Image (cartoon, coloured by chain):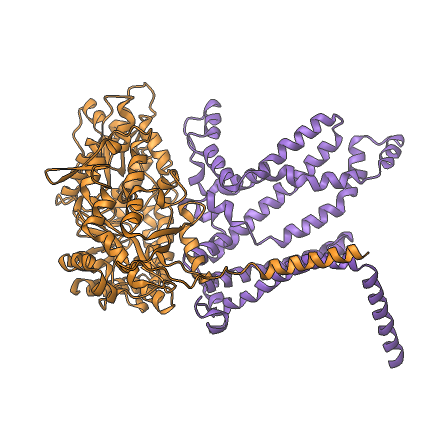
Amino acid sequence: MELIRTKRTGISFRIAKKAFIKHRQIYIMLIPIAVYYAVFCYAPMFGNIIAFQDFSFTKGFLGSKFVGVKHFIAFLNNYKFWSLVRNTLMINIYNLLFRFPAPIILALLLNEVKNQKFKRTVQTVTYLPHFISMVVVAGIILDFVATDGLLNEIRRLLGAKEAISFMTEPAYFYAIYTISGIWQEIGWDSIIYIAALSSINQELYEAAAIDGANRWRRVWHITLPGIMPTIIILFIMKIGQMLSVGYEKVLLLYNPTIYETADVISTYVYRRGILEMDYSYSAAVGLFNSVINFALLISVNAFCKRMTGNALW
Amino acid sequence: MKFKRLMCSILVSVLVFSMFGCGKGEKDTDVGVDEDTGMPEKLTIFCHFNPNVAKLGNDYNVVYGFQLLEEATGCQVEWVLPYGGNNSTEEQFNLMLLSRDYPDVIVSTWAKKSGGIQKYEQDGVIINVTDLVEKYMPNFKKYGDENPKVKKQYTTIDGQIYYFPFIRKDAQLGVFCGPNIRMDWLEKLNLAVPNTPEELHNVLRAFKTKDPNGNGVADEIPMSGQSLKGIFGIEHLFWPFDVPIGLFVEDGKIKYGVMDERFEQALTFVSNLFAEGLIDLDFMLNDRTKLVGKITNNQVGFATDYQPSQVMSTMETKDLNFKFEGIPYLANKKGERKVFAGGVNEPSVTDISAAISTANKNPIGTAKWFDFIYSEAGTYMMNFGKEGVTYTMVDGYPKLTDKLLNNQEGLTKTDAFTKYIAAYNSFFPMFQDWRYYEQYLHESGKRAIDVWTKSMDTSGMVPNYLPFTDEERGVIAQIEEQINTYVEEYVSKTIIGKDTPQNLPVVREQIRKMGIDQLLDAYQAAYNRYINM
């Protein structure tokens, strides 16, 4: 038994060595990527240690005092805790319900368009906003929803008497965030689906047409199943970010009157960490956030694997 | 094959070197010192970047005053300026600390740093300059000795000095903003200048309903402002009720506005104004550009803003009847015009201050260099430029020349002052002199500052620079920001009608839970020390 095992590992090692020598160029090309992840993604993870310390930048990682989970407890007891978690979740749920399907629908629609010129134009126009800096986008949004902005002018033309100050009404924030997000990213996000669509075998469509399937049927039975793996993978990745919202956009949009719905975990971390230099506390909040995201990612992956057979791993 | 192998090894080595090779460049160990004066030949200075100056050049050396300074002292300044505008200054200051790569001099808001200035000395960022001031800075020392009230503001409890401040030498310089009203509208509607909350209420109502701008549409915004707190916010509406939103002093006691009995009345008053549509719907969203846009668009009747020079100069060419004038702050029942934020009518220091870092190899020379800026010659250089070029002496009064007052190089007035007068954008430690500023101001601006300086009562203001202990700072750092955020959210929501003044007891209970008593104790202790200093 022992003998066989050693022999086997010996063989597999030899195979690996052979494979390595054979494909060494490829392995060497892999080095920069591996180094990149090691240096910029894995090494900084050790920095999370400051979440358990009272970090002082002059004393460094090794010199600062360890205080256990003090900062985590402080965060859980913070009066803002639940509203931060709720806002982060709500923005993501809105994104999942409205922003996630939008590029799929756009890709399906574009797939049915036969006029190439029109298709290209639509694609270009929809993905242009992706390249505009977030600061400019936020400025545009704020101007649109201002009391003398485009949105209120349209309402006035339709007969509304009073202007609505959208950015001081907590109720509108999720919608403003989501709709502007769709506008910004719909074109860019649809690229991956359009790519997936082009890999579907055209003969399937012909066969279906001969069998008498109409357009809807073809989309339902051929197109959608064709891009389902892509959808599932993107869905899982989205879920993995369920408890994180990029801080830049919220930071540029919000003001104290709408903190109730607009303040999210990442903006709170920014205010505490970068502005108030409370590094340990904000590291603790960030770590808490990542752990939950990680747990979500794993459970959704397992769920999808069982339900559809498609999954990340 | 050989070629491929060669390429691979080159690639890999390039990558490896780019990883390790991009560390710090070699530090020059050679310290240049001017033999005669002992001043350094070169200084690197971290400073925020004033947007007015940014329009004219890449750093502050574009400012004439600094060119003169380099000529006079032989010290060349290399500026380390944050990219991406002023909002990121604080962020980049913090990142600079983390990198531990300090320039010779760091200009920042030292007095306002959480944790206290001493912490930065203990952490080895900056040095204590008390001895340097004593030995090498006669001009700066002399001013401090002659003005103990100002000196208090830049000295710690135990009498130490850590930085050189920007000093407003004259009382009027501390007052730069206040309430402004459309005087022509008042005249048109036959109304008097409002003195009390009730009178203001009537005036605003008239502005709203009687179409003072005469365009036939009710598009007037009776009152506007920029956000809630701060010098340009609408917080001044609370003041005639003797309370601000946050901290204030009364009879030697530190108090918090929201916790005070009188706050409810004030909050009710302001939210009623808003409910009647008398306050700009967008007051929380306005920035200065938007506000000035609305004012010059003939829509705003009343707003707290800078003295009206800019607005009036803009409107002079468009509308001769347009009169935006400074008026006194509203008075309380006793006729006092309490002011809780936005300037003090006496000589004072600002937040801008410079500290010498531990990386500085010639602190003595640097101190001498700063002392030159504080000398009379330096003060004239920074405030007026060069005699015969930018000013001429007329009976002992430095009269600015046409280069500034009537610029022919195609510069606007602001640009001309930015270019020639270093003190104008107040970004660097020095003495500021009222005499250049009054020549900059429009007549209406001078009048406004005069009205505000004479009428305001700042006795309720918490002194800007209290001598806290480390422990007190710790308490404040933990509590204050949380409470302020919470309060600001509640008050702004109540004003716009999304919450009610009836909720105050609940809010106060929450504030108590967040530790308001400890916060007040910390402030009280420091305040007592300040009074006895």
Q: Can you name the residue that lies furthest to the front here?
A: B35
- List x then y, in percent, for residue B240: 20, 44
The quadrant of the image that shows the C terminus of chain B is bottom left
Camera sees residue B188: yes
Q: Considering depth in this image, is B352 or A231 the residue closer to the camera?
A: B352
Q: Is residue A14 above or below residue B43?
A: below
Quadrant of res B386: top left
- List x then y, in percent, for residue B174: 21, 46
Q: Considering depth in this image, is B268 or A116 the residue closer to the camera?
A: A116
Shade representing chain B: orange
How many numbered marks have been drawn onto this rendered protein structure?
0
Q: Considering depth in this image, is B350 or B202 the residue closer to the camera?
A: B350
- List x then y, in percent, for residue B92: 43, 54
Q: Residue at x 64, y 50 (%)?
A: A238
Q: Which residue is drawn at 21% across and 56% down?
A: B249
The quadrant of the image that shows the N terminus of chain B is bottom right
Q: Can you name the residue that lies furthest to the left here?
A: B395
Q: Is residue B101 left or right of residue B304?
A: right
The purple-tinted chain is A
Q: Residue at x 34, y 56 (%)?
A: B41
Q: In this view, does B496 lie to the left or right of B331?
A: right
Q: Is residue A180 left or right of residue A198?
A: left
Q: Can you name the residue that lies furthest to the bottom here?
A: A2
Camera sees residue B261: no
Q: Considering depth in this image, is A266 or B259 the residue closer to the camera?
A: A266
- List x then y, in percent, for residue A23: 81, 59
